[in-house]
Image (cartoon, rainbow, N blue to C red):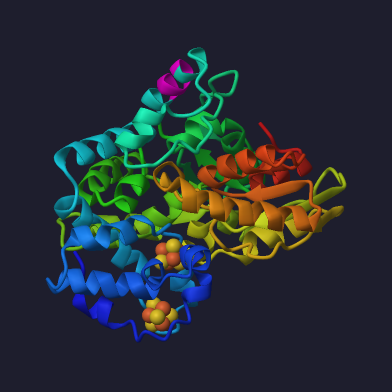
Amino acid sequence: MLDKRDLQKCIHCGLCLQACPTYVATGQEAESPRGRIYLMRQAYEGRIDWAQARPHIDACMGCLGCQTACPSGVPYAKLIEAARAEVETHARTPFQRFMRKQAIGNFTNPARLRALLRLAGSLGFQRMPRWMARALGASESAVALPKLPPQVWRPTQTVYPAKSTPRARVGLLLGCAMRVLFDRVHRATIGMLTLAGYEVHVPPNQGCCGALWVHNGYPREAQRTAKRLFRAFREMDYIAVNAAGCGSTMKEYGLLFKDAPEQAAAEAFAKRVRDIHELLADADLPPPKRDDSLHITYHDACHLVHGQGIREQPRALLKRLPNLKLTEMDGADMCCGSAGIYNLLQPKLARDALQRKIRNIQATGATIVASANPGCTLWLRQGLQEAGLPVEVLHPVEILAKAYDAMP
Ligand code: SF4
Ligand code: SF4
């Protein structure tokens, strides 16, 4: 629920405006954080309908660049999630709600996601059909459908022993898109964690973290799926996450369950959640085994840098590799436009953000982009391919696992 005290924290200074990709693209106040907070307050006080605020709430990437930039401590993540829940309840038709819930339900169910991608591939679809994009409220279908890896990876063990005296038991979150499309990242994560002295568990009965649900205005559905994780990871010292959006949501479970009977359990769970870079940065790693010459630029996934404040650790880990050159791009911490399912729903603004990002990547001359979120990785790969640039996009942990010869 929107909290008036949070809305009142905005002092209209405008220091967040240049950090906002939708304001930078449009120059319009209503597409800025300050404008959106004003609209939320108007709707909250009943001066306008949520339907009037809806286009501008929908156009927000939820990237939280404004939250980092704000000197007044406006909790924008909390505000936009609450505003989105109001929009879903008061400013969508039952058909729109149904379609959106179907889409999120498909993306957050690995078996269904895999089956749909397989079906789309066998029918030769390159993109989501236009009628489906329209039914979701998008003007066009901008996102290329990803190809499934040739083989389905399943963990061969439920426990991977530490390669030195175990320092802690860590449960690995498999996630939804990560499990279906990025098995290499999971294998690299297991390899690096065991090398760093963690005993890695892969609990079989885990589900979705709820990030897509909560980011799109469905907190009840997010709670339902989060509860499965409480059970699956109850024995673990830490829960390791290698997808920025999932980790950011899981660290905020206390807020998701505020005033619910599970609040204390949710807060205790959230305290054990660690991004993979945090776990590795805190551990003693042996020297890397390979010294391949690499030229890398690092893209800050929004929910890592703005959602979790993780900026230095991935860079510091990469800089341990002896022959690695890291060239910073302009706007490394500006959203690429992927933003969960934003690029499906808001293709024009998403493309604008992508094109800016691709120009900045190209200017570095790097041949690898390191990116720690599945949505960003797919969207950047698409943008680079469309621009004809021979640049790979890899998760930092994949780069590390290769250099440390740690892939199981
Ligand atoms: S979350 Fe991102 S897109 Fe939304 S208002 Fe803040 S900076 Fe702008
Ligand atoms: S959100 Fe923060 S930075 Fe932006 S106008 Fe309000 S107080 Fe200023």
Residue 271 x %, y %: 39, 60
Report if residue 333 is visible in the image.
yes
Up/down of 269 relative to 77, above or below: above
Up/down of 11 relative to 322, above or below: below
Number of numbered labels in the structure image: 0
Give whichever of 109, 342 is nearer the camera.
342
Q: Which residue is drawn at 21% across and 36% down?
A: 98
Tell me if residue 117 is in the magenta stretch: yes
The quadrant of the rendering that contains the N terminus is: bottom left
Residue 294 x %, y %: 83, 48
Q: Which residue is drawn at 31% across and 63% down?
A: 80
| Region rendered in magenta | 114-119
Give whichever of 247, 367 is nearer the camera.
367
Report if residue 320 is visible in the image.
no
Figure quadrant of residue 182? top right
Does residue 254 appear to the left or right of 27 in the view shown?
A: left
Tell me if residue 63 is in the magenta stretch: no
Residue 394 x %, y %: 67, 43
Give whichever of 58, 259 is nearer the camera.
58
The quadrant of the rendering that contains the C terminus is: top right
Up/down of 106 relative to 25, above or below: above
Residue 380 x %, y %: 61, 45
Figure quadrant of residue 221? top left
Q: Main secondary structure of the magenta part?
A: helix
Q: Which residue is drawn at 46% across and 19% down?
A: 120
